[in-house]
Amino acid sequence: MHIMGMMKFSYCVLLFGCLYHVESLSTLARSTCTFENATCICWHQYNAVYVNCSGGNVESIPGFNDSVIWLDLSHNRINEIRLQTIPKHLIHLDLSWNEIKNVTRGVFNSLPELSFLDLSYCKIHYVEEGSFSDLHNLRHLNISFNRNVGFASLPNLTFHLNKTRIGSLHLNGITCRTGAGTTLKRHHLDLIGTNITELSLESNRLEICERDVIKNLPKTLELLSMAKNRLKTGIYVLEFALMTGLKVLNTSFQQNPSFCPACVLDPCRDKKENFANTAGDSINGYEQHYDYNSPQTINWTIYSPPNLETFDFRSSTLYLLNTDVSVHAPNLRHVYFQHNFIVSLTKNFRMKNNSIVSFDISHNFCSHVSPQIFEDSRHLKHLNMSHNYLGQDLGKDTEGQLFKNLESLEMLDLSFNKIASLPKLLLGNSKRVRFINISNNRLSDWKISMSGMSKLVLLDLSQNKLTTLDENARTNIERVFKHSNLSIDLSENVLQCSCKNEEFLTWMSENEHHFINIDNYTCSPPNDGFSFKTLKKSVISLSKSCKSYLGWYVGCAVALAVFCSFVTGWLLVKNKWKIRYIIYKSKQKFGWIKQPSIHGSTSVNYEHDIFLSYSGCTLMFVLNEVIPRLEGNRNMKLIIKDRDYLPGFPKTDNIMHSLQESRKTVCVVSKTYLESRWRDYELNMAKIEGIVDRGRLDFVILILLPEVCKSGYPSKIMDLVMRNCYVEYPEEPCAYDDFWEKLVNMIES
C-alpha cells in the first residue's frame, strides 16, 4: 500500500459513514434550500437532513432546525460561532476555511452527538481552555493551518480531551511558517487517558521534543505524522520504542522548506509561552553530559516501536556512510528512505530478523551495498534501488550474493544505475519475481539466468546499449514464455538491422506479441529498408538480401578451393590489414589487451565524434585549422594523437581504441602521410573497421591537400576516392568555408 494512502487510512475510517452519504447523492433527491441568508443544497435520508452551504459567501451561521445532522459551512466568511443556530443533533460539522478567530468554552456544549469537527484554515488566534471537553462523542478534530494558534495554545486545546472519544487529532501547521525551530514540551499535549489512534503534527518547524513527550503519548496511538518539520536527533528518539501501539511513523520531508515569497512579509508571530512549568526547562528537559574522552566509535542498536509496520523518512537529508548500527524492528514491513544521502550500506548496517516487504532507497547517490544487508530479508517483495551508482557493485557480484536471500522478491527496480553488465547468477534465487526494471543503464548484453522465473510479466530493458540478444539470452527468455505472458521493452536501444543480426530479428518477429512499444524501436545505424512497424515483412526482405550474399560467399569458397594453392598467398598479401585487424579483435575479446581510457563522450554510441589521422608535417594545420573549426565551432570531440594518447600503451592499441570509440575517422592526406608506415597502418585499419564493424566504408573521410591532388591520386586511396569519401582542401582562401561545410556534412551524414 502506498505510504500516503496508509497515512490517511484511519482518517478515512472515521469519515466513512459521512462520506458514504455524500457518495450516495446520485441516488438521493437533492434540492435547493434557504436558511436565513444562506442558500444551500439539502437532501434527506432516514429522516435526517444533510446540508451543504460551502462556498456561499456566508458571513454568519444561519438558523437550522434540529433534524440536520450533517452540516458543511466551509469556504465562507463566518467570523463567529453562535451556539443558538447550530442544530443540537449534529454529527458532522465542517467550518474550515472561514474567519473564526476565537474558540471559547461552551460554544459546543449543546452538541453532545458531534463526532466530526473541522476548524482548519480559520485564522484562529485563541482557544479557551476546555473548549472541546464537552463534546463527549468527538472522534475527529482538525485545527490544522491556523498559524497563530501556536504550541502555546496546545494545553488549552487538549485540556480534558480524555472526556471525549477522540481518535484523530490533526495539528498541522499551527505555528508560523518562518522562524527558528520549535520545541514540543511536556505540558503541550494533555492526551493522557485518551484513546487517540492518529496524531498529526506536520509543518510546525518542529525541531526537537522534550523528554517524556513521546513517552506520554497514548499507547493506543497507531499513526504519528511529524513530516515537513526540522527534526534533529535527540534523546527523545529512544522513547519511540515505548510506543507499543504505533504502526505508522511518518517523519518525511525534514528540513525541506517550500518556496514561499509571501512568507517574507508574513505578519505571523509565534505565541509566547505563559506556563509556570516552562521555567528552567532545557532543550531536552534535562542537562546533557558527554564524555569527550570516551571512544568515538559506538555500536548503536536502535529499537523501533515493537508493532511499527511503516516508516517513512524520505527526503530528510539522512546521511549514511559506513555507519555501524543495528536496527531491531521485528514487525516493520514498509521502509521509505528515498531522496536522501545513503552513500553506502556496509555490513555494519544490520537489520536482523526483519519482516520488511517494501524497501525504497532510490535517489540516494548510493555506490555500495553489502550482501549482508539483505541476509534476513526473506520476506522482501518490493525493492527499489533506482537512481543510484550501483553499476560496479552489481557487475562484480558474480556469485549472486547480494540478492541471494530475496526468495520472495516480486518487484526489482535497478534503473538509472550506470550498469554496464550484470552477472548470470545475480537473481539466481528470486524465482517469484514479476517485474524487473533495468532501463536507462549501459547494458550491451543480457546474461542473467531466468531459469525458474515462471511469474515474470515485465522485463524493462529500454534505453540501454543493446544491439542484439544472443542465443543464450533468447533461450532463457523462451523458457519464461512457456509459463508466463512476459512483456519485454527494448525501446531506445541500438538494435542492429543487418544480416549479422538476422537470427535475432527473426526470433523477434516470431514472438512480436511479447515486445511492448515495438513500433518505437529503431535501427542503429539507420536502415531505411527495415521498419519495426512492419517487422515480419522487413525480416523476410532482409532474409532474401542476406541469402543472395550467402550464394556469393559459397561461390567464392568453391573458387578458392579449386585455386587454393595459387590464391592463398595472394589473399594473405591482399588482406594483410584485415588479418591484422582480426588478430587484434581476437586479443581484445579475450582480454589480452589493456584498453586505454579516453574520456569525453558527446555521442550516444561512441565516446568521440572523430579520430584524426595526420602526419607530423601537418601538425600546424591540425592545430590552427582542424581543431578550431571542428571542436571550437562545431562542438565535436576529436581524438588527437599528440594530445589524447595515453603514455604506457602500445601505439597500435591506442590507434585501434581510437578507431573503435570514434564515430568517423578523418585522414589529413599529404605526400608525407602517404609515405609514413604508421599512417598507412591507421588508414588501412580504419577501412577495415568501417567494413567489418560499421558495415560502411564512409566511416573514413579523406582531406586531400593540394600537393596530393596535383600529382594524382595514389592507388592506396583510390577505393575511397571512387566512393566519394574525400574532400579536397582548396588553395584559395575564399573557398575555405565551403570546404569546412562540406566536411561537416560528410561527418554528420
Image (cartoon, rainbow, N blue to C red):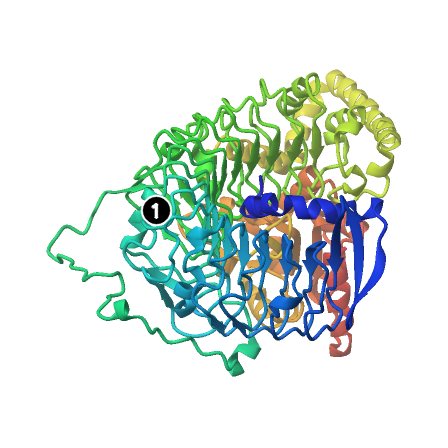
**Residue at 41%, 32% in the rendered image:** 374
Secondary structure of residue under mark 1: helix
> Could you tell me which residue is drawn at 52 percent across and 57 percent down?
641
Seen in the image, is 15 located left or right of residue 498?
left
Kindly identify the amino acid type of the residue bearing the numbered disc 1.
Answer: Phe
Write the residue at 59% across / 48% down.
Answer: 661
User: How far from the left and from the top, in percent, is residue 173?
Assistant: 50, 65
Q: Quadrant of the N terminus?
A: top right
The residue sitting at the left extreme is: 293
Q: Nearer the viewer, residue 166 or 135?
A: 135
Does residue 598 appear anywhere in the picture?
no
Q: Where residue 187 sits in the image (x, y, percent)? A: 33, 61
Whether 391 is drawn above or below 401: the answer is below
Q: Which residue is mark 1?
A: 240
Q: Residue at x 69, y 21 (%)?
A: 484
In this orientation, which residue lies closer to the viewer: 130 or 508? 130
Find residue 559 and report its image quarter: top right
Quadrant, the C terminus = bottom right
Q: Residues within 10 Å of mark 1 (few under 14, many from 20)?
A: many
Tell me residue 323's x, y (percent).
Answer: 31, 46
Q: Does the rendering let one see residue 497?
A: yes
Query: Which residue occupies the foreground of this view, 282 or 4?
Result: 282
Q: Is residue 145 left or right of residue 497?
A: left
Quarter location, residue 41? bottom right
